[in-house]
Amino acid sequence: MARWLPRSTDLTRFCQKLNRVKTLEDDMMETSFNRCLSTIDLTLLGIGGMVGSGLYVLTGTVAKEIAGPAVIVSFIIAGFASLLAALCYAEFGARVPKTGSAYMFTYVSVGEIWAFLIGWNVLLEYMIGGAAVARAWSGYLDSIFNHKIKNFTETHVGTWQVPFLARYPDFLAAAILLVATAFISFGAKVSSWLNHVFSAISMGVILFILIMGFVLAQPKNWSTQEGGFAPYGLSGIMAGTATCFYAFVGFDVIAASSEEARNPQRAVPRAIAFSLGLATGAYILVSVVLTLMVPWHTLDPDSALADAFYRRGYAWAGFLVAAGSICAMNTVLLSNLFSLPRIVYAMAEDGLFFRVFARVHPRTQVPVVGIVVFGLLMALLALVFDLEALVQFLSIGTLLAYTFVAASIIVLRFQQQKVDVPAPAAGGRPSPEPHEGPSAGELKEYESFSDKLQLVDRDKSKEHREPGQLKAAFEPYLEFLSDFYPGEVVTVAVVTLMVSAICLCSILVFGNTHLHLPTWSYSLLLVLFSLGFLLSLLLIWAHEQQRSTQTFQIPLVPLSPALSIVLNIYLMLKLSYMTWLRFAVWLLLGLLVYFGYGIWHSKENLREPRPQRVSARYVVFPSGSLEERVQAVQPGSQPATGLPDTDTDDCKR
């Protein structure tokens, strides 16, 4: 029976395969895409991804049902929370100007299987998101014509009463997706130009809403006679924050487009900052105008802005609002169709997804196969499926991506920068790399005893400390941590931080409602997990970071990413159990794809080091001194007994 069990070496090698990271090219600016997008192009793409139908629908819904006029505060808090995640994307987009967004960022810092699962979830997120927006676009246009399109379809095509399927096929939603797919396939410049047109119209309508709204504003609508500014209290504000947070999820299109930016090191951080700032300002100001025009409790959640103008005697303004809403939804559609094929391309280019999606059209320089295939899939979803039950699934995929990107920032910031070792000349020995080595407790192998002595002298002569090493000020108190390889303690601390955050948020969300914990145990668990989180944070901070680079870096690391992790986990745990169940099923399908295809076709398989043939090697055991514990080790191809003459000669040298 024991012979069928896997050996420990096989399990170790398997785990190493799962957690291997992507090797980046020397010239990260080299690409098969067309680097044609400017900072303005990226900014408008980000605005188009964030300022969609939510501006026209979400503001009224949250104001009436959740927070009242305090929806303004909800948007401010949600904008700040989104800023934490956006800054993480900005640093990665500048340092790794490759397409793939959260998938790519996770692959270069955390590991392969985690990157694949992030990419796998982002695929479904974009498909469902694009299809849902298309159906909203169709419904909004149909409402302008008194639902004539819907009535015609139900009369001449019929209706369905099947679970998970729509009541009737939405041909208009599928048609708009096919048209958008055709435009996206013409190239990044055409897509950007089309996004400029719709964004300009949308921003013009928003400007009109703000000017007219402030003219028609009545401060009495915030008075106590109408319920006050925060009728639902702090709990309503925080509940509104959780809902408003999802209005800002479109900024990752900028990171996904970094491989097509002319100067991604500067353009990506600026575009993310500008687009998030403008989107947050638009949501806040529109919320102010909307709740000042009419009493918040009389708003129509389905068409709050148009209804507000109609009730103030400006029915004609409703047509402008409808035009702005349709243009805003067009920009969201373009954003989804623009990002999705590029993430698929990144996964296929790395060998983790089917290689056919890595083909780039030589003329338009876009992944045309991915655009067409996933555009058709998105149109099929919009045509026949009931997406209302699946829309909440979007949240968990986005929040999971945000969490892993924030964790990746911490891991990458405390890693040593990899230095390429030049290939040795013919007949020569490879030069040792002073910045990289095995971790503590492993055998350190060198070609000669003198090489090891030189490395020891060089390490002692260094005055500065490498990233991932313990700071000098903490060495007297945490001396036992200095024996670990740089970055190992930080990686363990990040895992501990995430586990503590999950436990802490679980107690906050389920402690009183589902678990019915007594007050003393509830408080005790909160204190314990909070201490675990803070100690992990302090342990990370006690190590050296990478020094400032020429690209953008998020401030206050590890505090800023850690806060983003806690917030994202908290919001994920607030989702329904059915969302988690669907998420688990989708993850299982992804694991089948990964273990059936991705792990075998990954490009990193080709980069795995091969054993080198050497006559003899010296092994230095960490537990002993350098002079006392030196052994000559025979290569695997030679007998285990006896020393060859070369070993004796090396010792003499």
Image (spheres, rainbow, N blue to C red):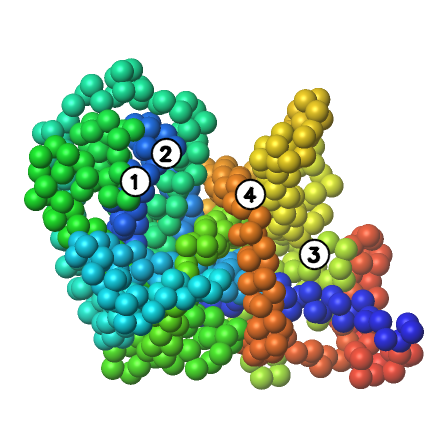
Give me the C-alpha separation between circle 2 and circle 4.
22 Å
The amino acid sitting under disc 1 is Pro
Closer to the camera in the image, 229 or 254 = 229
Residue topped by disc 1: 301
- Does residue 401 show up? no
- Does residue 625 show up? yes
Task: Say whether marks 3 and 2 touch (CB < 8 Å).
Answer: no
Helix, strand or loop at label 2? It is: helix
Where is residue 404? Give x, y as percent: 52, 52
Q: Residue 71: name its quadrant.
A: top left
The amino acid sitting under disc 3 is Ser
Give me the C-alpha separation between circle 3 and circle 1.
59 Å
Left/right placement of residue 580 relative to residue 242 reads right
Residue 65: give its label: 2
Q: Residue at x 91, y 74 (%)?
A: 1
Task: Say whether marks 1 and 2 touch (CB < 8 Å).
Answer: yes
